[in-house]
Amino acid sequence: MSHYIRLDDLDARIDPSLASPYIAKRSNKPEKAIEQFEVINNQLNLAKIRKRASEDRYPNDQIYLNLMPIFVSAVCKVFKAMKAADIGFKGFKGFDAATYLRPFTTEISVDCSRLDFERLWFRRGFLT
């Protein structure tokens, strides 16, 4: 499963140096926005992605990120933190309450430092 977004669309929403009106206003302090951008930039290795795109001469509007590994990594981190703090899982109700506990805390692991670069092909305006 994959869900791709353009890197320049992501930058428009998180990079304070672009002064974009689309930047999510999470704080009134500009230094906080810069700090958040640096954390995201570092943890997702966006500098390495930009460098590779530049070396391969891709225009900025042709660089895409697959959000699914990022999403799965985030869910794993949240579940592991909840489990370590012993919150949430004992109170889950319903037949599938604990269904995702084991997979997201012990079975699934995403290494955001390991990047896979692949060529995407467009057909009739959609990624294939």
Image (cartoon, rainbow, N blue to C red):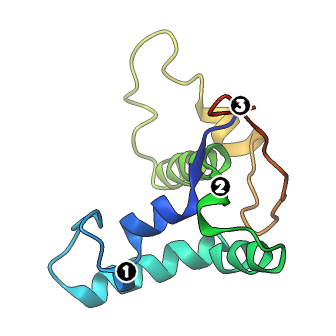
Which residue is the site of mark 1?
Answer: 18
Q: What's the amino acid at mark 1?
A: Leu
Q: What's the amino acid at mark 2?
A: Tyr
What crowding class fits label 3: few (fewer than 14 Cα within 10 Å), some (14-19), or many (20 or more)?
few
* Nearer mark to the viewer, of 1 and 3: 1
How many labels, in total? 3
Nearer to the camera, 62 or 109: 62
Q: Point out the image quarter for the C terminus.
A: top right
Q: In screen coordinates, is 30 left or right of 114?
A: left
Q: Quadrant of residue 45?
A: bottom right
The residue positioned farthest toward the left in the image shown: 28
Which residue is the site of mark 3?
Answer: 1
Rendering coords of residue 66 (x, y %): 66, 48
Q: In screen coordinates, is 110 left or right of 9?
A: right
Residue beneath the point at 72% across and 63% down: 112
Q: CA distance from mark 1 to mark 2?
A: 19 Å
Q: What's the amino acid at mark 3?
A: Met
Q: Earlier in the sequence, mark 1 or mark 2?
A: 1
